[in-house]
Image (tube, rainbow, N blue to C red):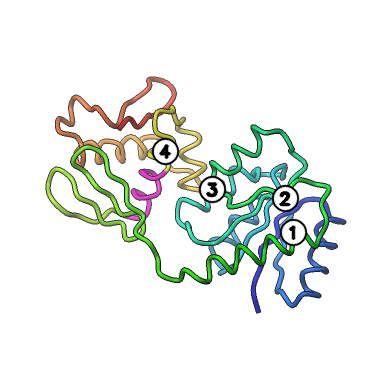
């Protein structure tokens, strides 16, 4: 039985969609806010996720962005009333595979879900999630990297932080955004922890760690990655 994580704060929609998918022989786990969605996504396997954007606690864009730091494979569909072009673009940039506007017809949602699951099930081999910059290379699927001192393995938190920065290349990412996306929404380490991670990245990847060109500090705000 295929498993769906349905993240929707409106009870009527949540229960109606859940019932319809169960009638199609899916197992449906529901979450009414973004915090619970992140907890379930980290603890359980799902064949697909359906996520609203306007959620309590943590919004849908933040949920998908955090999920994508460690899970590139599970298909995700946004199901939302936010119908502006910039919303759809933002949702796809965060890592969603599809974007469906409310109000919607269940048959269309079911078709999109089945097509996404079919597409991913035909490609079981995990493709290398490689990122190259300068003379450096990182495999986000295995955490293996090559830098100034040859090959080494990143920790999971290092890989998550590095992925967040590289996917937002050219943008300033605040310390608060980093803490929420990499460490979660319950317990934060000190911001000094982030500073130490950045120092490690400079040691790993910069030709001159004291004069970085890739991992830049923005005083009073956060950090920016530049290729």
Picture layout, residue 111 above or below residue 82 = below
Picture layout, residue 172 above or below residue 95 = above
Mark 2 vs 1: CB contact within 8 A: yes
Q: Nearer the viewer, residue 1 or 83?
A: 83
State the residue position of label 3. 95
Q: Which residues are magenta?
A: 155-163
Circle 3 or circle 4, nearest the eye: 3
**Measured from the top left, where is residue 96 in percent x and y?**
58, 50
Q: Residues within 10 Å of mark 4 (few under 14, many from 20)?
A: few
State the residue position of label 4. 190
Mark toward the start of the polypeptide (3 vs 4):
3
Q: Residues within 10 Å of mark 1 (few under 14, many from 20)?
A: some
Mark 3 vs 4: CB contact within 8 A: no
State the residue position of label 2. 79
**Measured from the top left, where is residue 62 in percent x and y?**
58, 43
Q: Main secondary structure of the magenta part?
A: helix
Q: Quadrant of residue 11?
A: bottom right
Q: Nearer the viewer, residue 219 or 3?
A: 3
| Mark 4 to mark 1 CA distance (whole Å) | 42 Å
**Measured from the top left, where is residue 123 in percent x and y?**
47, 68
| Mark 3 to mark 4 CA distance (whole Å) | 28 Å
Mark toward the start of the polypeptide (4 vs 1):
1
Name which residue lies at 18% across and 31% down: 209
| Mark 3 to mark 2 CA distance (whole Å) | 14 Å
Circle 1 or circle 3, nearest the eye: 1
Query: For residue 87: magenta?
Result: no
Circle 2 or circle 1, nearest the eye: 1
Mark toward the start of the polypeptide (2 vs 4):
2
State the residue position of label 1. 109
């Amino acid at each position: 039985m295929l498993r769906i994580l349905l993240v929707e704060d409106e009870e009527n929609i949540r229960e109606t969609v859940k019932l319809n998918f169960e009638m199609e022989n899916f197992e449906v786990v529901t979450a009414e806010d973004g915090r619970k969605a992140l907890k379930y996504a980290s603890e359980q396997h799902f064949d697909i996720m359906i996520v609203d954007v306007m959620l309590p606690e943590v919004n849908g864009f933040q949920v998908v962005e955090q999920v994508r730091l460690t899970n590139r494979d599970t298909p995700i569909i946004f199901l939302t009333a936010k119908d502006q072009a910039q919303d759809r673009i933002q949702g796809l940039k965060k890592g969603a595979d599809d974007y469906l506007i409310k109000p919607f017809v269940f048959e269309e949602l079911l078709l999109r879900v089945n097509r996404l699951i079919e597409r991913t099930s035909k490609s079981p081999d995990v493709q290398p999630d490689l990122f190259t910059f300068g003379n450096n290379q990182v495999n986000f699927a295995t955490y293996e990297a090559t830098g100034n001192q040859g090959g080494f393995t990143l920790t999971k938190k290092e890989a998550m932080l590095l992925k967040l920065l590289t996917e937002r290349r050219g943008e300033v990412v605040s310390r608060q955004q980093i803490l929420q996306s990499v460490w979660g929404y319950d317990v934060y380490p000190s911001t000094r922890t982030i500073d130490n991670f950045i120092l490690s990245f400079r040691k790993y990847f910069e030709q001159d760690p004291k004069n970085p060109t890739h991992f830049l500090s923005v005083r009073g705000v956060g950090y920016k990655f530049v290729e």
